[in-house]
Image (cartoon, rainbow, N blue to C red):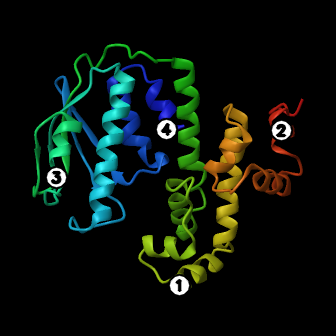
Amino acid sequence: MYGYALLSSANFIDVSMVNNKYILSGSPFCQAPMILQDNGGYCTLTPRQWADPADMAYRFSVEFALAAHLSVCRDVTGGRFRFSRVELAYPRPLYGHAYEEILECPVSFDQEENIYRFEAPGMQDPLPFADARTNAMVLEICEKLLSELNVSGGIAADVRELLVEYVGHFPDLEGVATELGMHPRALRRRLTNEDTSFRELLRDVRMRLAVEYLRKTELTNEEISCRLGYSDAANFRHAFKRWTGCSPSEYRGMDPNGD
């Protein structure tokens, strides 16, 4: 949904707004706030799971973000977007020469932070795939996913938020506890105090996402099962029937108003 929201935006200013507000729904490796300036701007990349620039996973997360941002922004602007300079917090790797070849701009290593500066002429010009109807629909889904899954408050809301951020590769309880800086036993105890459990929260997140996908997208059962972390569509169908009493196909064919 996040990708559709970017692609269907009216102009690059809207693209930056979607990025800054909804990027977490895209399960990114990095926080990536985008700041616009005249015909361009800059974006700071901060790995979410790794703090040490010497860590290979830290470097990979930044490389992944750079490649994704460059590719997506070029796609949505019809090629008008380009990096003008990239500064990276880690040492130059052995394949450092490939950065400038691929990113097509000067690249500096051993800097204070990871930041790319970009040019995007005509930021108010209509984008090639702009579609107001599609954009409104997918932004509504992004908004609901970020709000409805956190209505309960407390530690349960924090767990829900993390699960939404990792759609497609949900962490287990131990992984969530690590993200929250807690011992798994302490997390389990606090969830019990809020009359819930990790298993119940994961089920709820999956069920809500499945309902949104079935109601508002044309994704196949196979595609939905992949996004929800199931090994195959059959497991997703069985789980959905336990939740709702009907199959995904039956649910999709129902009138949302109950008529």
On screen, residue 250 above or below 45: above
Q: Secondary structure at mark 3?
A: loop
Amino acid type at image mark 2: Ser
Q: Identify the image quadrant of the C terminus.
A: top right
Q: In this rendering, which labeled residue sits more in front, label 2 or label 1?
A: 2
Quick check: marks 3 and 2 in contact, CB under 8 Å? no
Mark 4 surroundings within 10 Å by alpha-carbon count, few (fewer than 14), some (14 through 19), many (20 or more)? some
Amino acid type at image mark 4: Tyr
Looking at marks 4 and 3 on the same chain, the residue that comes earlier in the sequence is marked by 4
Quick check: marks 4 and 2 in contact, CB under 8 Å? no
Q: What whole-number distance in Å separates the C-alpha atoms at marks 1 and 4?
A: 33 Å
Mark 1 surroundings within 10 Å by alpha-carbon count, few (fewer than 14), some (14 through 19), many (20 or more)? few
Residue at 16%, 40% in the rendered image: 100
Where is mark 2, residue-wise?
A: 249
Q: What whole-number distance in Å separates the C-alpha atoms at marks 4 and 3?
A: 26 Å
Task: Compare residues 137 and 233 and report the one nearer the observer.
Answer: 233
Looking at marks 3 and 1 on the same chain, the residue that comes earlier in the sequence is marked by 3
State the image coordinates of residue 183 (x, y, percent, origin top left). Answer: 48, 84
Looking at marks 1 and 4 on the same chain, the residue that comes earlier in the sequence is marked by 4
Looking at marks 4 and 2 on the same chain, the residue that comes earlier in the sequence is marked by 4
Residue at 29%, 50% in the rendered image: 63
Q: Is residue 204 left or right of residue 75?
A: right
Looking at marks 3 and 2 on the same chain, the residue that comes earlier in the sequence is marked by 3
State the image coordinates of residue 98 (x, y, percent, origin top left). Answer: 20, 44
Q: What whole-number distance in Å separates the C-alpha atoms at marks 2 and 1?
A: 40 Å
Task: Compare residues 68 and 39 and report the one nearer the observer.
Answer: 68
Q: In this rendering, which labeled residue sits more in front, label 1 or label 4?
A: 4
Where is mark 3, residue-wise?
A: 88
Q: What whole-number distance in Å separates the C-alpha atoms at marks 3 and 1?
A: 37 Å
Where is mark 1, residue-wise?
A: 186
